Image: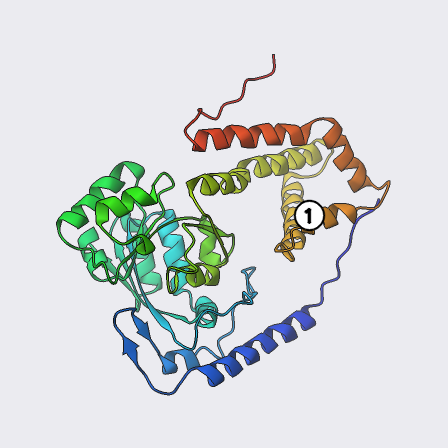
């Protein structure tokens, strides 16, 4: 059986991690002035005591993403983040958790960011209460969207699609939006940036749409941001990069196309379940089969992710399969069976649904 083996060298990984911390300390010492100053228009504040306390703060080795993005967007200043969440469901809770987790502070600091406060609406009460209990020093729970917006500079809209227009219009009618300070970020998958600009009266460089998955709580996965913010917003893209990663999308069509990848999460779990069941049929216990499949897929995905900014990474991994080996043969058999053609048809169908052109269904084979 031909299998690829990768040696694990924990001591070298630990050494590399400590060197990262040394480099961060050198960066901070070289670029952050001792004075504390603020510019209210852009909410730019230098918090030297806060930043210095992060130098020796290590990220936990619990499977989270601990690789810093090579870019640094601080320009010698620190943006103080006052985040608000209107609607406190799964995604809102995940982003808030990622922002407030102490182990993530060095990643924020590396991007020139520091968390000042988190404001959340009470609903869902179970999740908002859990956030308050876990991060009592930074989280405040409010009864209304108005209070959250008044106490925030960046407002994450995390409500149901049917509630979005009413919530935004109500805040507009009450004169809540501060056009020079507020940034609105919608997590509503069906939202349109142009519509939000029209309803709120906020300038175009202050209104965005983000798509992400719950693993952002652990700095895992990758967020989608539309429109691009690198040139138009002082800290939004660095913020998302600090929370795990971000890809900027030019328009809603690109967002919909990119959303196809996470939509294949269900099929991936289906393949894993099918593999588990096959092992059980061949005498493996359900517990051992489930454990082995989960751990095996984890190692494969980690291998692929290790250099995923390289556009040829996946091709290289396929080329590494031993000629005439079991992995190469399995891949060839699946290609002959039309499995990847079926994947293409499935992606086309889901994209059509996202574009509002169909219900996403495919005809069943007769």
Tell me: 88 left or right of 235. Answer: left
In the image as oriented, which residue stretches furthest toward the bottom?
34
Q: Estimate how packed mark 1 is, as few (under 14), some (14 to 19) or many (20 or more) residues with alpha carbons within 10 Å.
A: some
Tell me: 61 left or right of 210. Answer: right
Residue under the point 54% across and 60% down: 64
In the image as oriented, which residue stretches furthest toward the top?
366
Residue 340 at what x, y percent from top left?
66, 32
Front residue of this view, candidates 110 and 269: 110
Quadrant of the snapshot with the N terminus:
top right
Residue under the point 68% across and 72% down: 11
Residue 60 at what x, y percent from top left?
53, 67
Tell me: 318 left or right of 47. Answer: right
In the image as oriented, which residue stretches furthest toward the right?
324
Residue 143 appears in view: no
Residue at the spot of label 1: 314
Residue 219 at what x, y percent from top left?
49, 58
Quadrant of the snapshot with the C terminus:
top right
The quarter holding residue 151 reads bottom left
Secondary-structure class at tag 1 = helix
Q: Which colour scheme is used?
A: rainbow
């Amino acid at each position: 059986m031909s299998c690829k083996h990768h040696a694990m060298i924990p001591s070298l990984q630990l050494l590399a991690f400590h060197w990262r911390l040394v480099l961060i300390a050198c960066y901070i010492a070289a670029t952050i002035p001792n004075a504390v100053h603020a510019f209210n228009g852009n909410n730019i504040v230098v918090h030297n005591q806060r930043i210095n306390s992060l130098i020796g703060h290590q990220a936990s080795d619990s499977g989270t993403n601990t690789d810093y993005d090579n870019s640094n967007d601080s320009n010698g200043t620190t943006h103080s983040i006052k985040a608000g969440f209107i609607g406190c469901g799964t995604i809102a809770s995940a982003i808030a958790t990622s922002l407030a987790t102490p182990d993530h502070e060095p990643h924020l600091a590396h991007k020139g960011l520091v968390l000042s406060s988190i404001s959340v609406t009470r609903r869902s009460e179970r999740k908002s209460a859990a956030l308050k209990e876990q991060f009592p020093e930074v989280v405040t729970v409010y009864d209304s969207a108005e209070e959250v917006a008044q106490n925030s500079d960046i407002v994450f809209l995390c409500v149901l699609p049917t509630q979005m227009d009413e919530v935004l219009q109500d805040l507009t009618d009450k004169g809540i939006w501060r056009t020079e300070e507020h940034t609105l970020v919608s997590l509503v998958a069906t939202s349109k940036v142009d519509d939000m600009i029209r309803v709120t009266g906020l300038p175009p460089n202050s209104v965005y749409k983000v798509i992400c998955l719950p693993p952002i709580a652990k700095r895992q996965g990758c967020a989608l941001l539309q429109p691009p913010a690198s040139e138009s917003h002082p800290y939004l893209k660095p913020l998302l990069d600090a929370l795990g990663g971000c890809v900027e999308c030019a328009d809603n069509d690109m967002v919909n196309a990119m959303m196809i990848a996470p939509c294949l999460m269900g099929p991936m779990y289906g393949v894993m379940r099918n593999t588990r069941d096959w092992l059980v049929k061949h005498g493996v216990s359900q517990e051992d089969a489930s454990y082995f499949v989960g751990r095996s897929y984890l190692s494969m995905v980690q291998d692929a992710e290790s250099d995923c900014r390289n556009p040829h990474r996946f091709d290289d991994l396929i080329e590494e399969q031993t000629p005439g080996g079991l992995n190469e043969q399995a891949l060839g058999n699946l290609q002959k069976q039309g499995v990847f053609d079926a994947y293409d048809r499935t992606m086309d169908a889901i994209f059509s649904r996202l574009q509002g052109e169909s219900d996403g269904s495919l005809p069943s084979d007769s």
